[in-house]
Amino acid sequence: MKTIVLNQRKERDELLSRPYLTRRSDLDIDMLLNSHLIKLITGPRRVGKSTQALLMLRDKNFAYLNFDSQPLLDAWDANLVMRMLDDVYPGYEYLLLDEVQNLDAWDLWVSELYRMGKNLVITGSNAKMLSSEMATVLTGKYLQIEMLPFSMEEFFDWNKLNLHGLKPEEQAEGKVLTDDYMRNGGYPEVVASRQLVRSYLDTLFDSIVWKDVAKRYNVRNITDLNNLAMYLVSNFCNPLSANELAEELGFSSVNTTKKFMDYLHEPYLFYYLSRYNNKLKLMNKAPRKVYVVDNGFVMAKAFAVSENLGRLLENQVFIELIRRGYDTDKSLFYYRSRNDKEVDFVLRKGTHIERLVQVCYDMSSPKTEKREVDSIVECASELKCNNLTIVTYDEERTIEKDGYTIAVVPVSKL
């Protein structure tokens, strides 16, 4: 065990020696670290959770355990591990547990560490850490920091450009980067090596499906699970129901389909957006729209006959709204009017609808403009909302219609 802990110390020190892009964040790191609540960093695999944790603790005396390590899991003995940590990291102030969800009954062990007074920073790639496991054992004992792939702003930072302050001579490069980000996404490992996008994200997608879903939940019918994942990534931004999916894919059970859909959400691979309705029962019955955590997965995996720039832009806007704290359970929905007109995103604050957002890649055609404007205005009238935005690839203007003012903004100014 001591050898494992020593090897992980070398791994930690090597990671600390690398240069990193500091992610944009409103977090007060000192305040977080001074709190004795557990610091829980969650998000998809490979988005930089470990890096964020290491950067937070860089100047501190901290111990490190990485549970993405089969030798550690195979040799697990909690008491022995704690003794080895004291040996290898004498007097450590913080304990970083990386991908801790891989350890059986991790939540009980973490709760014990918390009672012992350990100052814990934890990373994990599974949303269920928050829902059932964290909620039952660790309620009120943790602060959550959710991480996603690079935002468009961070992608520009990486390329040493300021998204919101482009100089005239940088406009052309800015257009190239905007298009690049929309097509290839923001996974940290590939922002510097765009030629690797397809192969890296193809492998990562499969790893999430097989390791974070099939293995974790002992899924026996892996073929059905994989077929569902491939269908979802190829039909992103479309409304789908479990009944339709079961029929389309030839699954024997609608319940299994629902279960597999939930499994694929838990490692932050897919999100499902409900149709807004004041009546919860009707909202739960309506098809949900499916979104992917990063556009690069579409490039790597989707069966696309032709590229759909409109859907890529819509998926990008959805993930940006998630990044800003909107939640598909409480504050983010889509809406369809009584006449079947649709608005892509309804943003709600408490019981108040604060904004409607429509996404349209190119609104230069009068016919397209009329369709999009008519849809958002009709939905605004039914939902009693005056704050209307249409997000485009690069247009910026204002449209007046039926007493409503609609801000047309490029995606860079969402």
Image (cartoon, rainbow, N blue to C red):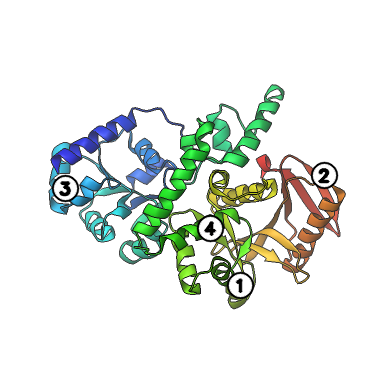
Considering the image in quadrants, where does the C terminus appear?
Answer: top right
Camera sees residue 56:
yes
Instruction: Using the rendered view, name the quadrant where residue 332 is placed.
Output: bottom right
Residue in the foreground of this view, choosing between 229 and 295? 229
* Residue that badge 1 annotates: 283
Which numbered disc, 2 or 3, marks the residue closer to the eye? 2
So how many labels did they put on this image?
Answer: 4
In the picture, the disc for residue 364 is 2
First reached walking from the N terminus: tag 2 or tag 4: 4
Provide the secondary structure element on which disc 2 rests.
loop
First reached walking from the N terminus: tag 3 or tag 4: 3
* Residue that badge 3 annotates: 81
* Residue that badge 4 annotates: 271
Residue type, label 1: Met
Residue type, label 3: Val
First reached walking from the N terminus: tag 4 or tag 1: 4
Residue in the foreground of this view, choosing between 157 and 366? 366
Asked if marks 3 and 4 touch (Cβ < 8 Å), the reply is no
Provide the secondary structure element on which disc 4 rests.
strand
Name the residue located 56 percent from the left edge and 67 percent from the top edge: 245
Report the Cα–Cα distance between label 2 and label 3.
63 Å
In the picture, the disc for residue 34 is none
Along the horizontal axis of the image, is 100 left or right of 274?
Answer: left
Residue type, label 4: Tyr
Report the Cα–Cα distance between label 1 and label 3.
48 Å
Which numbered disc, 2 or 1, marks the residue closer to the eye? 2
Report the Cα–Cα distance between label 3 and label 4.
37 Å
Which numbered disc, 4 or 1, marks the residue closer to the eye? 4
